[in-house]
Amino acid sequence: MKRRAFIKSTAIMVAAAGASNALKAAQRFQPEAQSGQDQPEAQSGQDQPESLRGQDQPDGVGEYTSPEVPEGEGKLITSAPMLQNYAETSMGVAFAVGSLANGYVLVGEKPDLSDARKVLCGGYRVTAISDKVIQVRLTGLKPATKYYYKVGADRIHYGGGYDMKVLGNEEDQTIHSFTTAGKDAEAHFCVINDTHARWKAIDPTFNKLAELSPSCVIWNGDATNVEETIDSQVRIFLDPEVQRKDYAADTPYLFCPGNHDSRGMANRHMENLWMFRQPEERDPRDWDLGRNFAVRMGKVALIGLDTAEDKMDTNPRFAGLFTSESYRKAQTVWLKDVLKRKDISSAPFLVAFCHIPLFDDNPESNPGDIAPDDTDPRYKHDFAIWQRTCANLWGPLLDKAGCQLVITAHQHQYRFDPPAEGRRWAQIVGGGPEFGEKNYPTVVEGEVKGGKLQVTVHNIRTGQVQETFSFAPRKRFRG
């Protein structure tokens, strides 16, 4: 073998071996079981209904196929669209594709899209090309305005820098709609959490959301388990094994990641499927805070925070590859600023969302700041049951701003914590994907009625209302 060819061949083998070793290392440490939530059961398919794949798509989804599609190729658009990162003047749209494609959205204010403009995937300079997921960020929208849209994609041949062409086009003929956020938008939100790809729990949860028809849904973490490939993420968000494949096509979603949503090679960069906001939608200082949100929805200000991992950065099982501590501190600076924003500070109601609870009165609950490896005989678990660090960083700021409610998750058991001395905000902990008497899925619904914020907790196991709460408009505390 010639020396140059030998060097090239050796480099390829070394790179392949490195990638294989990295994947094995990522898979080596599996998360601890907490209330039956974790990976083995969710991946094995136990307690899941028969797969719904292959059943008819919602009317119109992927019905049109260009006659230029190469022989033997299937549909190009393989999922309904998903509305991501609900905001006042922007909206994200993502959908799955079955082969190399360049995608777009046609969006306008008229139901027949006669006034539509075409927005391509990707940012400036070049468009995005993907054989998995197309992401389009719609910007320059008007607040509290209803828009209509449909998605399309071009099948791409790419053989090199000068060898590329469009092989055909496919458009989803279903016209969907959404309404942007803003102070004049309808104040009606729902929260789900800890779904962990458990279709038995997700299917009725999506049905309840369709019944309630909120302006926006907050997915409050642990939507995933430990995802190593984007294909598994597509299965969870874009092509779930549920009846309502178009669950997020007309209802926008916001996302507060959970600890599981950073685990696995694919989850480390979930923005490849669930987009960040565009750089122009964030202060340059906060460009890495793509999951935080501060959104005005009618009389309610919605604040999204990321509690990050439930283990210390110093825990040896993570090999120094997580930096949650600095991430939480950066969010504190961001939170201090957004609470002063006029659209946020003027809202009568302030609700914050994060995955790991910011309060727990059980003395055996690990507070998540036990260095270096989360282990202490005082606590039953070697990972955070609640997040004392985040409570200390964010709690006083929320208190001073008059926050009435923090909605959290993680513990897989519904609980309400009323305000107490030193903590003026109440806390709701959402349920998990199990179907026991104490552990059951929940949908937390918030809606402004009669000048108050009415919060209803729906028990998905029984189909009944579990509890209701009412919050008066907030007061700004300065002490």
Image: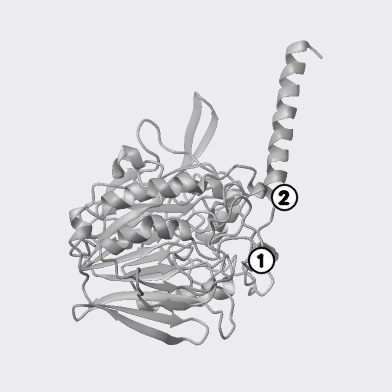
Q: Quadrant of the N terminus?
A: top right
Mark 2 or mark 1, which is nearer the start of the sequence? 2
Residue in front for this viewpoint, 151 or 17: 17
Residue that appears at 48% across and 63% down: 356
Res 307 visible: yes
Left or right, 45 with reference to 123: right
| Real-space CA distance between mark 1 and mark 2, rounded to the nearest whole angstrom | 15 Å
Disc number placed over residue 437 in the picture, else none: none
In the displayed structure image, the side of residue 265 where residue 187 appears, left or right:
left
On the question of residue 67 being in view, the answer is: no
Residue 33 tag number: 1
Density class for disc 2 (Cα within 10 Å; few <14, some 14-19, many ≥20) is few
Measured along the vertical axis of the image, is residue 344 above or below residue 322? Answer: below
Label 2 is placed on what type of residue? Arg
On screen, residue 115 above or below 407: above
Alpha-carbon neighbours of circle 1 within 10 Å: few (<14), some, or many (≥20)? few
In the displayed structure, does residue 124 sit left or right of residue 80? left
In the picture, residue 43 is in which quadrant?
A: bottom right
Residue 162's x, y, as percent? Answer: 49, 23
Residue where numbered disc 2 is placed: 28
Q: Quadrant of residue 185?
A: bottom left
In this view, the residue farthest toward the right is 1
Q: Residue at x 68, y 40 (%)?
A: 22
